[in-house]
Amino acid sequence: MLAMAHQEEEQQVLSLEDYFTGRTRAWGIFQDRFGRLRRRFEVDIDGSWDGETLTLVEDFVFDDGELDTRTWHIKKIADTVYRGNAEGVIGTAEGVVKGNSFNWCYDFALKVGKKTINVRFNDWFFLQSDGIMINRAKVTKFGLLLGELTLVFARP
């Protein structure tokens, strides 16, 4: 049964504009490089697609009460290629869809306490059955792992 489910998932094709148009909710954690849980958060996402650009307004609520909002503007460059930017992104984020997965990489000015450090995000999104998507991201600086993010997205 697991093999059949795996085959069905592999046959799904991820379309960012289809998945993220409308409301999406996500739950996430950040673990440091030693695997220790450092933060939990929830995200409400409002997405709109104008035929060229996917706009995502992400409202974060962290377990310590901190609130943050990030707005992504993601252009579809080709059938499977996307480029985008958002507050804090250094340069341009770039991504490619392959089947049910999406790899999204970008440099980011991350606020840590009163400091800001430039880090690299390497995100992998995997579309699952029933509209669930799992995101795993490695956060690095100078090629050294600082930590990992795990998010689960669901469509209401």
Image (spheres, helix red, strand yellow):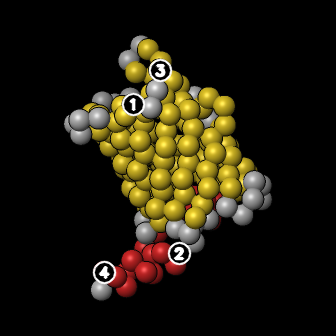
* Secondary structure category for the residue under label 1: strand
Q: Earlier in the sequence, mark 2 or mark 3?
A: 2
**Label 2 to label 4, Cα distance in Å?**
16 Å
Q: Looking at the image, tell me whether mark 1 or mark 4 is earlier in sequence order.
A: 4
Determine contact: label 2, label 1, CB under 8 Å.
Answer: no
Name the disc covering residue 117, or none: 3
- Cα separation, mark 3 vs mark 4, equals 42 Å
Marks 2/3: CA–CA distance: 37 Å
Amino acid carrying label 3: it is Ile
Mark 1–mark 3 CB contact (< 8 Å):
no
Q: Which residue is mark 4?
A: 2
Dot 3 or dot 4, earlier in sequence: 4
121 and 132: which is toward the camera:
121
Task: Locate residue 152: give its quadrant.
Answer: bottom left
Q: Quadrant of residue 9?
A: bottom left
First reached walking from the N terminus: tag 2 or tag 4: 4
Q: Label 2 belongs to which residue? A: 12
Picture coordinates of residue 3 (x, y %)?
34, 82
Q: Nearer the viewer, mark 1 or mark 4?
A: 1
Residue 75 location (% of width, % of height): 72, 50
Residue hosting label 1 = 144
Q: Secondary structure at mark 2?
A: loop
